[in-house]
Amino acid sequence: MTDTTKFWAVVPAAGVGKRMNADRPKQYLLLAGKTVLEQTLLRLLQADVFSAISVAISVEDPYWPELEVASHEKIITAPGGKERADSVLSGLKSICAMASDDDWVLVHDAARPCLTSSDIHHLINSLVDDEVGGILALSSHDTLKNVQGTSILGTLDRSHIWRALTPQMFRYGMLKNALEAAEGNLAVTDEASALELLGLQPKIVEGRPDNIKITRPEDLALAQFYLEQQ
Ligand code: CTP
Ligand code: MG
């Protein structure tokens, strides 16, 4: 890594939160006195490593302009896309005039507000000399079954199975190329899978279990609990 290598963050925040089943997208639900999205962005700003943070926001989103953080000097707004990968690509394009191909980008879900500075620095320190980059991940504690309908076909070897979290950290140029090559491929649900399709092998870095993604209503109370504990 050269001294001029920069770090950027891209935050996809253009989802509708269907599984949350609330009156607004889940990133605008209140969590410990702020919206989920504000909590997430605060965490990234506090890490104090990013040259800028590009946030992908749905073009019909009336909530974002109301947030104070939307006008923060380090925050850039990009138009959201149809799928998560489209939103991430849009975020990458919004910094193309400033970012170099060799810079690092950390992509982090708006819906993961319990990310700690320690995990951000752990990911960066673990991967900064890596050729490809990688992701925060968690091993599975439960025994995992391969199931068809309701019948168990077998038990998976858990030692090879990891749950993908965010942030996911890749070089700007490589990630943009990979997402462009994968455009329209619905199997690309995270950044790593776009690089895997190019035959590359991203690394995993063990993350903290409190870095949960708010997906269903019960997750909000759990996130509140984790924030209080941290
Ligand atoms: N996201 C995005 N653009 C999309 C879809 C999702 O930026 N077109 C973002 C979400 O806002 C979220 C992250 O990607 O921060 C992870 O997606 P997910 O948890 O699936 O959120 P939603 O798609 O909003 O939720 P659901 O799938 O339940 O509708
Ligand atoms: Mg979704």
Image (cartoon, grey):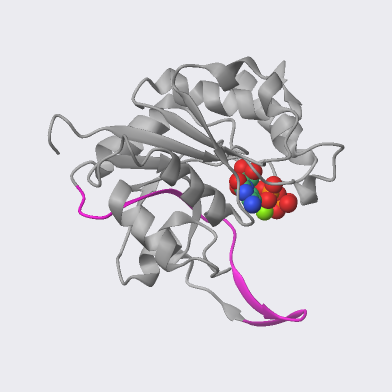
Query: On the rendered image, what quadrant is the N terminus found in?
Result: top left
Residue 220 image point, x, y percent: 74, 34
Q: Residue furthest toward the front?
A: 97
Give the camera-side residue of 154 and 54. 54
Residue 151 shown in magenta: yes
Residue 55 shown in magenta: no
**Which span is picked out in magenta?**
130-153
Against 212, residue 194 (above or below) is below
Give the camera-side residue of 200 and 94. 94
Which quadrant of the figure has residue 22?
Answer: top right
Against 106, residue 180 (above or below) is below
Residue 19 image point, x, y percent: 78, 51
Give the camera-side residue of 129 and 140. 129
Query: Taking the image as drawn, is residue 44 in sight?
Result: yes
Residue depicted at 41% across the width and 67% down the height: 181
Does residue 124 appear left or right of residue 216 in this picture? left
